[in-house]
Image (spheres, rainbow, N blue to C red):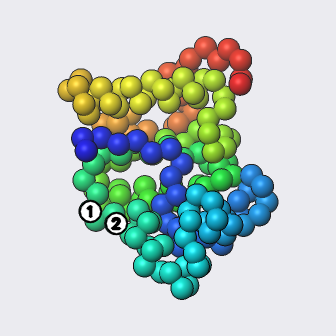
Amino acid sequence: FKAAAAGAPLTNMISMYSLIYWNSGGTNQAIFEASQGRLTPGYWDNWDAFARNSPVYHIKKVQTPLLLLHNDKDGAVDFTQGIEYYNGLRRLNKPVVMITYRGENHGIAKMPNRKDYAVRMMEYFDYMLKGKPAPEWWSKGVNRLDMEKHLETRAFDGGEEN
């Protein structure tokens, strides 16, 4: 693939299995065993399957540039999943940018953030697939501590919050 985008991806099924699904208050175990994961029994008896389905264990093989979205208040897939994957990719000098909207959950609820992400995806895919110039946020990055100021420079009319 020439480019990929992932929103709040579960990247380490082993570490995520016993964590809390904060949006409901239960553990992730039922989701892994009977719902989306369909992996049973638990990782202690099924290590290979859990590792095989965990992108974090395959970082060395990644070649496709990745636009990664993971919000800091994600109650479905723990924010540390995105951080772990992003930091691993960066450590190996893989082409990746992680976008985080402060205070957002598993999806993007605030209209200015929705608009910003839609534009970033278009800029990213235009660069990767159509040969347009790289957006500065991709080529140079934006320090997390400077993100609020950066977003103000890209401000979109907020309109309704939802």
Q: Residue at x 78, y 55 (%)?
A: 24
* Inter-mark Cα distance, 1 to 2: 6 Å
Where 69 falls versus 45 (above or below)? above
List the residue tagged with mark 2. 58
Residue 103: name its quadrant.
Answer: top right
Instruction: Point out residue 66 in the picture as x, y percentages from the top left corner.
Output: 35, 45
Instruction: Point out residue 147 in the picture as x, y percentages from the top left corner.
Output: 53, 36
In front: 6, or 100? 6
Disc 2 marks a residue whose amino acid type is His
List the residue tagged with mark 1. 61
Q: Residue at x 54, y 85 (%)?
A: 45
Disc assigned to residue 80: none
In front: 20, or 103? 20
Locate residue 124 relative to residue 99 in the image: left or right: left
Q: Is residue 19 visible?
A: no
Callout 1 environment at 10 Å: few (<14), some (14 to 19), or many (20+)?
Answer: few
Locate residue 66 relative to residue 109 in the image: left or right: left
Instruction: Point out residue 22 in the picture as x, y percentages from the top left corner.
Output: 74, 56
Instruction: Point out residue 25 in the picture as x, y percentages from the top left corner.
Output: 79, 60
| Dot 1 and dot 2 residues touching (CB under 8 Å) | yes
Locate residue 60 relative to residue 87 in the image: left or right: left
Q: Quadrant of the C terminus?
A: top right
Q: Is residue 9 visible?
A: yes
In front: 130, or 135? 130
Disc 1 marks a residue whose amino acid type is Lys
SS of the residue at dot 1?
Answer: helix
| Number of numbered callouts drawn | 2
